[in-house]
Image (cartoon, rainbow, N blue to C red):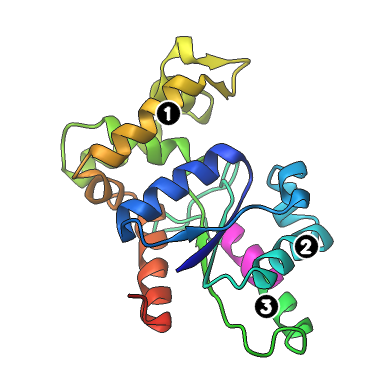
């Protein structure tokens, strides 16, 4: 299964890679980002710059992606009644629909599945779940109350966060290793509606593609 991840930054990409491997095992081929994607980061490249976003999608289609995972933080936006960042999802869906309509003649035989990941505020809330030692969903969802300005410190430790946003590489790697080893990680993460929404989309896409 060939997967292209389009995200705001490289750490988001590594987190999603670890999660997908956790879900599917090692039978995935995570495709390399294009040069354009590596040099244009941030949510504006995904939400506000359609011409740039299209370049990311063209790269995914050119590389024969089976699944395209697009991750954008929900920072600054309210969650809907179901606990999902629906506004951000709608912007992505509209842009994807426009791209597909405009490029059906370019890729007549390609129908990759799309999975839209919109974490609570940032993907660091998902990673915070890895630290929790309880399984009750109502307790796990309490992490959604952590202010966005504090979530990196809460997740990685104050000494491992520099300039307010840069995460120490060793601390980040340790967190990825913990995700990989924790047998209950997916169950805990699934208590967060934003992650469950991601999982539901992943399952539906795999069912449609008849993933092995």
State the residue position of label 2. Answer: 55
User: Please, is residue 84 above or below residue 13 in the view?
Assistant: below
- Give whichever of discs 2 and 1 has the lower sequence position: 2
Q: Position of residue 205 (x, y in %)?
A: 43, 75
Among the 4 quarters of the image, the one containing residue 128: top left
Q: Residues within 10 Å of mark 3 (few under 14, many from 20)?
A: few
Task: Tell me if residue 93 is in the magenta stretch.
Answer: yes
Name the residue rendered at 33%, 49% in the picture. 192
State the residue position of label 1. Answer: 173
Q: CA distance from mark 2 to mark 1?
A: 30 Å
Q: Residues within 10 Å of mark 2 (few under 14, many from 20)?
A: some
Which residues, given as a range, are shown in magenta? Answer: 87-95
| Residue 97, disc | 3
Describe the element under mark 2 as helix, strand or loop: helix
User: 157 or 120: which is nearer to us?
Assistant: 157
Give the quarter of the figure containing the N terminus: bottom left
User: Is 179 situated left or right of 59 in this image?
Assistant: left
Q: Residues within 10 Å of mark 1 (few under 14, many from 20)?
A: some
Name the residue rendered at 59%, 40% in the picture. 10
Q: Position of residue 27 (x, y in %)?
A: 37, 62
Give the quarter of the figure containing the C terminus: bottom left
Pointer 3 and pointer 2: residues touching (CB < 8 Å)? no
User: Please, is residue 9 above or below residue 89 in the view?
Assistant: above
Among the 4 quarters of the image, the one containing residue 202: bottom left
Q: Position of residue 129 (x, y in %)?
A: 31, 37
Describe the element under mark 3 as helix, strand or loop: helix
| Of labels 1 and 3, the one closer to you | 1
- Give whichever of discs 3 and 2 has the lower sequence position: 2
């Amino acid at each position: 299964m060939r997967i292209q991840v389009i995200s705001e930054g490289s750490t988001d990409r590594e987190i999603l890679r670890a999660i997908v491997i956790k879900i599917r095992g090692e039978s995935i081929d995570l495709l390399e980002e294009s040069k354009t994607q590596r040099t244009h980061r941030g949510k504006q490249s995904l939400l506000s710059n359609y011409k740039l976003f299209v370049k990311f999608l063209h790269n995914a289609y050119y590389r024969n992606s089976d699944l395209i995972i697009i991750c954008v933080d929900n920072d600054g936006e309210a969650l809907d009644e179901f606990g999902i960042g629906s506004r951000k999802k709608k912007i992505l869906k509209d842009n994807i629909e426009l791209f597909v309509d405009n490029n059906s003649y370019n890729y007549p035989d390609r129908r990759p599945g799309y999975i839209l990941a919109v974490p609570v505020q940032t993907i660091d809330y998902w990673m915070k779940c890895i630290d929790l030692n309880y399984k009750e969903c109502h307790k796990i969802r309490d992490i959604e109350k952590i202010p966005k300005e504090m979530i990196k410190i809460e997740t990685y430790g104050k000494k491992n966060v520099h300039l307010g946003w840069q995460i120490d590489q060793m601390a980040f790697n340790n967190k990825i290793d913990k995700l990989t080893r924790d047998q209950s990680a997916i169950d805990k993460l699934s208590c967060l509606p934003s992650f469950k929404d991601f999982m539901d989309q992943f399952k539906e896409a795999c069912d449609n593609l008849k993933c092995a």
